[in-house]
């Protein structure tokens, strides 16, 4: 049986992202999705609020799980921060198991981490995070989402209904999850996330549940809806976040739930995909300070700098993540804005994943999903 501690060590929204079979890994190498950071034609030089050489001789260890986003942070945020403050910024991968273990041992392996919002909620409840104030940099802007005592939104992503597109594909476009479930109007193979988070919400929305009535989630009703579409999914339950994009590109799936920034990177690199924003499930990855962090003041400066509108807009240009402050969209190319989850025109149709509810209910929900999928 899955425990709360297991959930905390694995992370939240990407629970089994690393559990990919060797066969799938070999296929990905044969037709990889490029993950290189987009070249930013206008490097950001805004360094408002930073004091030159304020942190000379110090090192800030920062964690981010996604390789493309980690590279973007290094290029967009860490480089100018280091140049002005004199602080060395080491970007490393977020490892949830290592993070909790190192905090338990009194020596967190990073000073600042960018983590899934769901994980941040559970980690705060389990006393793994320290409160901190980030408003030390002039012009910081986080007003689309709420900030917490121990977490500050870093960027937003959305689970969207994605589908194959292009001149050689004649697929109808499902406008919402109810249409996505309609096998007559939209024939073809489906792919869904192999996990309760996001998948249960999608199933309930497809059955007519209103966004305001989603939580608390009805496990039984969600599973009944998944059973109705499972014949179109079969063995296309994705675990690694790259899989639905690859399957759409290869023709293994025609319609898939997928994270918006992965779809964005694929389209930028020439893959014939498209997606819709209606009823997209939005969530944030958040900045957190592990208990025992040795560089809280530097981390606060770094987060304040990273959340300036210019920084958020540059991250959007680099990897397609959604800004968490409305000011980042001021003066933004409308073509770019239309591809981001938190653009003003999209916010009304988005549904925010309730990370607080999931922090309490992840273990039983995932157990119910696993039992159904395994036929228990």
Image: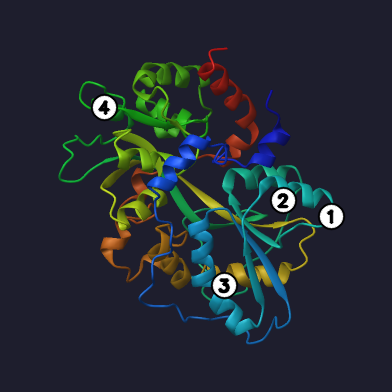
Could you tell me if the residues under marks 4 and 3 are in contact, i.e. CB atoms within 8 Å? no
- For marks 3 and 1, the one nearer the N-term is 3
Could you tell me if the residues under marks 2 and 4 are in contact, i.e. CB atoms within 8 Å? no
Secondary structure of residue under mark 3: helix
From this viewpoint, which residue is outermost toward the right?
Answer: 105
- Specify whether 116 is left or right of 55: left
Residue where numbered disc 2 is placed = 99
Checking the image for residue 106, the label placed there is 1
Instruction: Write the residue at 48% across / 35% down.
Output: 23
- Label 1 crowd bin: few (<14), some (14–19), many (20+), radius 10 Å: few
Residues under labels 1 and 2: Cα distance? 11 Å
- Mark in front: 2 vs 4: 4
Residue where numbered disc 3 is placed = 78
Q: Position of residue 246 (x, y in %)?
A: 37, 42
- For marks 2 and 3, the one nearer the N-term is 3
- Label 4 crowd bin: few (<14), some (14–19), many (20+), radius 10 Å: some
């Amino acid at each position: 049986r899955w425990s709360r501690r297991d959930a905390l060590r694995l992370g939240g929204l990407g629970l089994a992202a690393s559990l990919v079979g060797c066969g799938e890994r070999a296929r990905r190498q044969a037709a990889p999705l490029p993950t290189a950071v987009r070249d930013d034609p206008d490097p950001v030089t805004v360094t408002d609020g930073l004091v030159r050489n304020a942190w000379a001789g110090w090192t800030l260890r920062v964690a981010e799980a996604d390789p493309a986003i980690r590279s973007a942070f290094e290029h967009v945020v860490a480089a100018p921060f280091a140049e002005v403050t004199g602080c060395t910024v080491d970007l490393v991968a977020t490892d949830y198991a290592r993070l909790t273990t190192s905090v338990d041992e009194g020596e967190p392996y990073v000073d600042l981490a960018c983590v899934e919002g769901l994980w941040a909620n559970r980690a705060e409840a389990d006393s793994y995070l320290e409160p901190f104030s980030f408003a030390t940099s002039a012009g910081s802007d986080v007003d689309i989402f709420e900030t917490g005592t121990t977490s500050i939104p870093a960027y937003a992503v959305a689970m969207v209904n994605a589908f194959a597109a292009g001149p050689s594909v004649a697929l109808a476009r499902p406008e919402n999850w109810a249409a996505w479930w309609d096998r007559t109007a939209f024939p073809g193979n489906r792919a869904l996330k192999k996990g309760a988070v996001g998948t249960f919400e999608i199933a309930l929305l497809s059955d007519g549940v209103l966004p305001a009535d989603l939580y608390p989630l009805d496990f039984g009703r969600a599973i009944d809806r998944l059973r109705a579409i499972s014949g179109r999914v079969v063995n296309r339950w994705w675990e690694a976040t790259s899989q639905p994009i690859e399957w759409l590109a290869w023709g293994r799936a025609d319609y898939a739930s997928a994270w918006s920034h992965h779809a964005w990177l694929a389209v930028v690199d020439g893959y014939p995909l498209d997606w819709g924003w209606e009823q997209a499930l939005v969530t944030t990855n958040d900045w957190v300070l592990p208990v025992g962090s040795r560089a809280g003041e530097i981390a606060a400066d770094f987060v304040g700098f990273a959340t300036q509108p210019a920084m958020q807009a540059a991250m959007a240009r680099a990897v397609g993540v959604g800004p968490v402050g409305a000011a980042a969209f001021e003066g933004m190319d409308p073509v770019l804005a239309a591809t981001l989850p938190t653009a003003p025109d999209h916010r009304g149709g988005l549904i925010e994943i309730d990370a607080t509810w999931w922090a309490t209910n992840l273990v039983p929900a995932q157990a119910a999903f696993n039992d159904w999928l395994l036929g228990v």
